C-alpha cells in the first residue's frame, strides 16, 4: 500500500526507480500528511468536479484529489516520474497523467476532453520557479476553472494576496485581483517537504471572478499602466507612466488630476478602481 508522506517509503520508491530529485524542476515533495487532505478540501474537490493538477511529483496530492473529485488530470514535466506515478496511482481509474510542460500544453483542450459536463478547478503544489508565470497564464487565458488553489513560496503568497493599495502589493497583485479574489489559506513550514526547501510556503486560493470588478476601455493599456506604476516604486506614478508609455508628463498629470490624485502619487496610493480610472483617463493621451 502507498504511504506517500512517509520519508522511508518515498526514498525506497524513488530508489527502486533510480530517481534523483531535480532542484531545477522545483522538486520538493510534501511529507506532512495533513497538507494534501486540506488542499483537496479547500479546492472543492468532490462529485461533479474535475481537478487539474500541475506537477504531481509522486502523486501525494493526486491521490487525495482522486479520492473525492470526479476526475483528476495531472500534468507532469519530468518523464522520470511517469513510471513512479503509474505505480502509485494505478489503483485509481479517475486519474489521467499527462506528460508535458504546463506552460506549453493546450489546457483548454485538456479540460474540454477530460472535464466535459464537470465544474473545473486547479489544485497544485507549484514548482516555485514558475509560480507567477503559471498563475498569470491560467488567469489571462481565462481558462474555464472556478478556482486555483496552490502552494507557493510564502513571500509570493503575501504579495499575491496583498490588498491593492498596500505596501506589499505589486503589479502581479493588481493583475491577480482583476481576475480573481485572492485569499491566503494556511502556512506550510519547510520541514513539511522532502527534501526541505530553504523557504516556507503558503497555500492560497484564487476564486476566479465571473466578470472583472472594474470597467476598462482598453485592457492592454490598463496592464501597461499598472506595470509602469509598479516598475519603480520610489518614482512617482506620473514619472513612471510618462517614461514607460511615452506619454507627455502633462497628459499623465492631467489624467491623475481627473481621478483626484496628486502629481506626487506613488504606487501604494492606488486601489484597483483608481488604477482602472487612471488607465481609462489615459486612453486618449496615448
Ligand atoms: N505535487 C507534488 C507534491 O506536492 O509533493 C510535487 C510538487 S513539486 C513542488 C513540483 C512538481 O512539478 C515536480 O514534480 C516537477 O517535476 C513538476 N514540474 C516542474 N516544472 C513543471 C512544468 N513546467 N510543467 C509541469 N510540471 C512541472
Image (cartoon, rainbow, N blue to C red):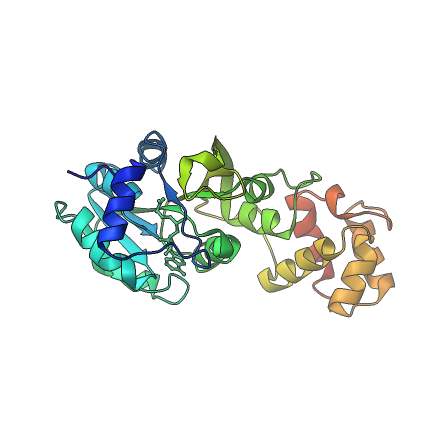
Give how far across and how far down residue 230 sits, in percent: 71, 53
Q: Describe residue 187's horizontal placement relative to residue 276 as left or right.
A: left
Between 64 and 72, the residue placed more toward the observer is 64
Q: Describe residue 79's horizontal placement relative to residue 83 as left or right.
A: right
Residue ID at (50%, 49%) = 179
Give how far across and how far down residue 268 sits, in percent: 74, 43
Between 273 and 20, the residue placed more toward the observer is 20
Q: Quadrant of the C terminus?
A: bottom right
Task: Let me know if residue 47 appears in the view.
Answer: no
User: Looking at the image, is 32 positioned above or below residue 92?
Assistant: above
Residue ID at (61%, 48%) = 174
Residue ID at (85%, 63%) = 249
Residue ID at (21%, 42%) = 66
Q: Quadrant of the N terminus?
A: top left
Give how far across and how far down residue 237 sits, in percent: 79, 54
The tally of labels here is 0
User: Looking at the image, is 253 positioned above or below residue 36?
Assistant: below
Amino acid at each position: 500500500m502507498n504511504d506517500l508522506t512517509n520519508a522511508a517509503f518515498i526514498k525506497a520508491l524513488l530508489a527502486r526507480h533510480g530517481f534523483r530529485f531535480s532542484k531545477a524542476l522545483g522538486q520538493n515533495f510534501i511529507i506532512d500528511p495533513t497538507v494534501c487532505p486540506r488542499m483537496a478540501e479547500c479546492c472543492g474537490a468532490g462529485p461533479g468536479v474535475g481537478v487539474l493538477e500541475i506537477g504531481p511529483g509522486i502523486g501525494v496530492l493526486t491521490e487525495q484529489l482522486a479520492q473525492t473529485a470526479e476526475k483528476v488530470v495531472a500534468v507532469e514535466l519530468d518523464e522520470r516520474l511517469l513510471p513512479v506515478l503509474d505505480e502509485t496511482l494505478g489503483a485509481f481509474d479517475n486519474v489521467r497523467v499527462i506528460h508535458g510542460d504546463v506552460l506549453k500544453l493546450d489546457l483548454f483542450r485538456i479540460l474540454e476532453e477530460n472535464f466535459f459536463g464537470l465544474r473545473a478547478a486547479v489544485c497544485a503544489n507549484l514548482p516555485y520557479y514558475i509560480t507567477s508565470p503559471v498563475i498569470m497564464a491560467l488567469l489571462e487565458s481565462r481558462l474555464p476553472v472556478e478556482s486555483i488553489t496552490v502552494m507557493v513560496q510564502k513571500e509570493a503568497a503575501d504579495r499575491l494576496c496583498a490588498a491593492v493599495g498596500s505596501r506589499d502589493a505589486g503589479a502581479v497583485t493588481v493583475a491577480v485581483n482583476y481576475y480573481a479574489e485572492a485569499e491566503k489559506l494556511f502556512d506550510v513550514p519547510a520541514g513539511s517537504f522532502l527534501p526541505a526547501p530553504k523557504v516556507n510556503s503558503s497555500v492560497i486560493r484564487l476564486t476566479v471572478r465571473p466578470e472583472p470588478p472594474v470597467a476598462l476601455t482598453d485592457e492592454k493599456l490598463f496592464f501597461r499602466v499598472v506595470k509602469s506604476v509598479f516598475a519603480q516604486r520610489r518614482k512617482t506614478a506620473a514619472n513612471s507612466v510618462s517614461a514607460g508609455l511615452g506619454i507627455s508628463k502633462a497628459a499623465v498629470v492631467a489624467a491623475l488630476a481627473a481621478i483626484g490624485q496628486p502629481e506626487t502619487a506613488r504606487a501604494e496610493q492606488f486601489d484597483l478602481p483608481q488604477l482602472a480610472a487612471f488607465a481609462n483617463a489615459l486612453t486618449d493621451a496615448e
